[in-house]
Image (cartoon, grey):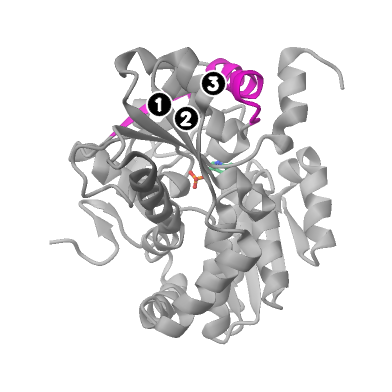
Amino acid sequence: MLQTGRYGEYGGMYVPEMLVPALKDVDEGYQRYRNDPGFRAELENYLKEFVGRPTPLTLARNMSEKYGLKLYLKREDQAFTGAHKINNTIGQALLAKKMGKRRLIAETGAGQHGVATATAARALGMKCTIFMGEVDIARQKMNVFRMRLLGAEVVAVKNGTRTLKDAISEAMRHWVTCLDDTHYLFGTAYGPHPFPAMVKDFQSVIGKEARAQILEREGKLPSCIVACIGGGSNAIGIFSGFLKDENVRLVGVEAGGCGIESGKHAARFQTGTKGVLHGSYTYVLQDKYGQIQDTHSVSAGLDYAAVGPEHALLRDVGRAEYSYATDDEALFAFQELGMVEGILPALESSHAVAWAIKNSKGFEKNDTVIVNLSGRGDKDVETVAKQMGVSI
Ligand SMILES: *Cc1c(COP(=O)(O)O)cnc(C)c1O
């Protein structure tokens, strides 16, 4: 029997006492509105008019020919602001507004979730504050300015390593001081209950669409679904459409960074152990004392020390499998999809593309594989140029 907020032994709500009322409030609001026809209709309308859904399912003809399988791409790169994150931010922003909140706060690492939250706040006429590590602010000037252009206040976090995990901690601390009018819009299928369940719900539109689209195109279910995994929201979003279809293989791809042996990676399922980070019990990269380890990935969106709790359960029960791609493999996939197909994927999504390339020999010509293209590559062009040793 699945307890509230639990995925087997994983998940839960491991937070300081002061945060519990806030999370219960969000959960109540979510339970109240999640099946409300008025709420769903309004959300659907935003997804259609503002986000541009449904996103296409594209047959990658040239890649299919070259690698000997039938490769489809679910085009979340076509969603407004260039990635799947907007599905969640619009969903939670609308929910928060229904609950009478007037302000959104959020954490961000590279700035993508900050931009998506600022966008949703503007669209719904809400105030917005984004917490971002000082180090990340210096690295991501463009996205910081983008957030400011969208009317968001960006707060520099000066604790710890001054990166994403500190920004999350600071946002949670701030939240308890302003519960009355503020919603904490968490960015991935992670964190304390109800975030993993709620974010999955708002991202499940990817899986619903993909399932209908592939059935219409192929008249049968796909052989395999592949998605990259940071916190796990784009992956659980597309997986959710196929979880009950036992014959559809589900593959999550983590960031292998400089290789597993190097220790510089974010492959929680490779060398992580069970523990708690930011309110959830799951696989965490930590030392023997439970201190969080530094992670590394060429893609900021996958560079996090813990993985969504539902993925931990799906792995334990064998419903999904989890692999990784290194920085080099992802960089190759980035360039390959551009050169062969005319599509530059986000470096995060490039990890999923890399898995499909690497494992293409395991598929037949008529096997359909859907890669969730979680975002577009424009944001990563500078990083890629640097890695290639090219000056632009
Ligand atoms: C943030 C991000 C991810 C990683 O987040 P998930 O919650 O694991 O989906 C993946 N791809 C892109 C393009 C992102 O911006």
How many labels, in total?
A: 3
Which element carries disc 3, helix, strand or loop?
Answer: helix
Residues marked 1 and 3 touching at CB (< 8 Å) = no
For the question of whether residue 184 can be seen, the reply is: no
- Quadrant the N terminus occupies: bottom left
Q: Nearer the viewer, residue 326 or 366?
A: 366
Give me the disc on residue 102: none
Amino acid tagged 2: Ala
Residue pointed to by mark 3: 62
Q: Nearer the viewer, residue 216 or 347?
A: 216
- Residue 281 in percent (x, y) is at 33, 50
Q: What is the CA distance from the residue labelled 2 to the residue labelled 3?
A: 17 Å
Mark 1 → mark 3, Cα distance in angstroms:
10 Å
Mark drawn on residue 70: 1
Classed neighbour count for the residue bearing mark 2: other residues with Cα under 10 Å, few (<14), some (14–19), many (≥20): many
> Residue 340 in magenta?
yes
Tell me which amino acid carries mark 3: Asn
Q: Name the secondary structure under disc 1.
A: strand
Which of disc 3 and disc 1 is earlier in sequence? Answer: 3
Any mark on residue 352, and which?
A: 2
Q: Which residues are magenta?
A: 321-344
Residue 330 drawn above or below residue 289: above
Instruction: Tell me, yes or no, whether the two marked residues, 1 and 2, touch with CB atoms within 8 Å.
Output: no
Q: Residue at x 40, y 62 (%)?
A: 201
Residue at image location 56% in from the left, 34% down from the top = 348
**Predominant SS of the magenta segment:** helix
**What is the quadrant of the C terminus in the image?**
top right
